[in-house]
Structure formats: C-alpha cells, structure tokens
C-alpha cells in the first residue's frame, strides 16, 4: 500500500531491532506514523499492538489490511483480555524499543497519572519498569492543530438522490440514509469507491480540519515529557534511534 504522505525520515537505523509499535485511537498523525512504519520495517522487526480504538481507527483510514500483511505480528487489545499478557514479553526484554504513535490525549492522561488499565498503558508501564526505552508521539501538542479526516460526506454538496450510487454499491454497507445520507465510521474501510460514484463530489478522504486543543491536554503532554524512561516527539518523522 502506498501512503498519501511523504516524510523526511530521520530514523537512524540499527539493523535488526525488535520494535513494539503501539497505535491508539487517533486519526491525527496516524497516516504519518504508518508511513514511518513502512519505511523501517525492512530493517527492523515490528510487532504492532492496537488498542481497541486503534483497531477501529486504522480500519477507518484504510490501513487495516496493510498493517495485517506488512509487519511481523499484529496484536489487538480485544485478544489480550484484562491482564494484557503481552506485557510479559517486555519483562523478558524481547523488544528493544516501544513506540506509541499516535498517542491520544486519553492515553497520555493515564500514563502521566500512573494508570495502567488498558493494553497500551500496561505496555508503557511495563516497558519503563523493565528498562525498555519508550518513544511517544502525542496527538495534543499545540493549541491549534490541523488534522486529517477519514471518509467524509459533505452535507452541503449531497443532493439526497433517490437512487444514491455510493449507498447502493458500498461493499461494506457503510453508507446509509436516515434524515440524510451518512457514512458509518465503524463499517467504512476507506476503500474510496464511493468517491468516484458520487456525481456531486460530496464524498472525500483526507480532508483537513482545525481543532482547538484543551489546555488540560497540553499540560498533560508537558508532564509526559518529564517522566523517566519516556522520550516525547512532536511528530513521527522526528523519531531517531
């Protein structure tokens, strides 16, 4: 799969590192993170750990199939139960580095308060305890940020056609109609077939929106930078090893 993003990667490689790459439920910086993963997977073994929301969001952005086929192993939170047995590998130092990118504000808030009640927060806690370096790319760094949207339907352009080709031909049945035509985010795989099918160009992928980050989330990111065993990066392409 070819990503829509081209990054200037500053990842200084050491051949044959064993990486544990954790993905939380953020769309912001997700495509950029995936591009970096692709760039380095030929030189390093990457195990991907997906939070529950991470599994959903990678599907929304059309990355689910590529992640399943391009990396050494994919582990989901759903199959790890409450005890997250994957953390045992960190205790045995099976990984040289843990990367959390992207890392949601929710996950950051838990980490800075020592809460380890999910797969990703458990992995971070155990990595620090075991002396395994942790790199984190938080999503909430600046007060105003531009983020990338998954499949989106512009209601102003939609004509509510009686015979809606995108709705009728969506392979995942992710497009439906109630008072208007909508895209169900959890069913959509970003195959993008609907973009060509809409005569009025009401459907798009990768649109940009501005978001205003809460002061609380920015403060938590600053606290994260002060924690031992963790290195914080503003973007995936800033990661160096």
Image: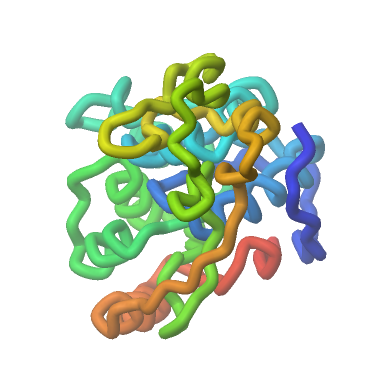
Whether residue 184 is visible to the viewer of this picture, yes or no, is yes
- Coloring applied to the structure: rainbow
Which quarter of the figure is the N terminus placed in? top right
| Displayed quadrant of residue 78 | top left
Point out residue 80 in the picture as x, y percentages from the top left corner.
29, 25
Tell me what residue is drawn at x 24 percent, y 80 percent: 216
Residue at image position (71%, 48%) is: 35
Q: Is residue 67 left or right of residue 36?
A: left
Q: Position of residue 15 (x, y in %)?
A: 80, 44
Whether residue 73 appears in this view of the structure is no
Q: Nearer the viewer, residue 79 or 130?
A: 79
* Image height of 223 relative to 209, above or below: below
Residue 215 quadrant = bottom left
In this picture, residue 125 sits left or right of residue 93: left
The residue under the point 60% across, 30% down is 194
Location of residue 191 by image quarter: top right
**Vertical relation: 203 (above or below) 230:** above
Q: Residue at x 50, y 76 (%)?
A: 145
Classify the position of the C terminus by image quarter: bottom right
Residue 76 rendering spot, x and y as whole percentages: 39, 28
**Residue 22 drawn above or below residue 105:** above
Q: Nearer the viewer, residue 137 or 135?
A: 137
Residue 7 lies left or right of residue 112; in this view the side is right
Residue 67 screen position, x and y as percent: 60, 30
């Amino acid at each position: 799969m070819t990503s829509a993003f081209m990054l200037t990667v500053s990842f200084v490689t050491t051949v044959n590192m064993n990486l544990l790459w954790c993905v939380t439920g953020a769309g912001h910086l997700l495509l950029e993170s995936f591009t970096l993963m692709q760039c380095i997977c030929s030189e390093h073994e990457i195990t991907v750990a997906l939070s529950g929301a991470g599994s959903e969001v990678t599907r929304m952005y059309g990355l689910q199939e590529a992640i399943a086929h391009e990396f050494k192993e994919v582990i989901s939170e759903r199959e790890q139960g409450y005890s997250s047995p994957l953390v045992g590998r960190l205790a045995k130092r099976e990984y040289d580095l843990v990367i959390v990118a992207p890392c949601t504000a929710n996950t950051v808030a838990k980490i800075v308060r020592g809460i380890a009640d999910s797969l990703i927060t458990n992995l971070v806690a155990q990595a620090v305890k075991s002396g395994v370096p942790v790199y984190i790319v938080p999503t909430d760094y600046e007060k105003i940020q531009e983020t990338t949207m998954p499949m989106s339907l512009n209601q102003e352009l939609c004509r509510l056609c009686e015979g809606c080709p995108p709705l009728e031909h969506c392979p995942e049945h992710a497009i439906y109609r109630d008072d208007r035509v909508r895209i169900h985010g959890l069913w959509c795989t970003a195959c993008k077939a609907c973009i060509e099918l809409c005569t009025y160009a009401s459907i798009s992928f990768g649109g940009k929106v501005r978001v205003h980050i809460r002061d609380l989330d920015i403060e938590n990111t600053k606290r994260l930078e002060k924690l031992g065993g963790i290195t914080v990066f503003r973007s995936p392409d800033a990661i160096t090893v």
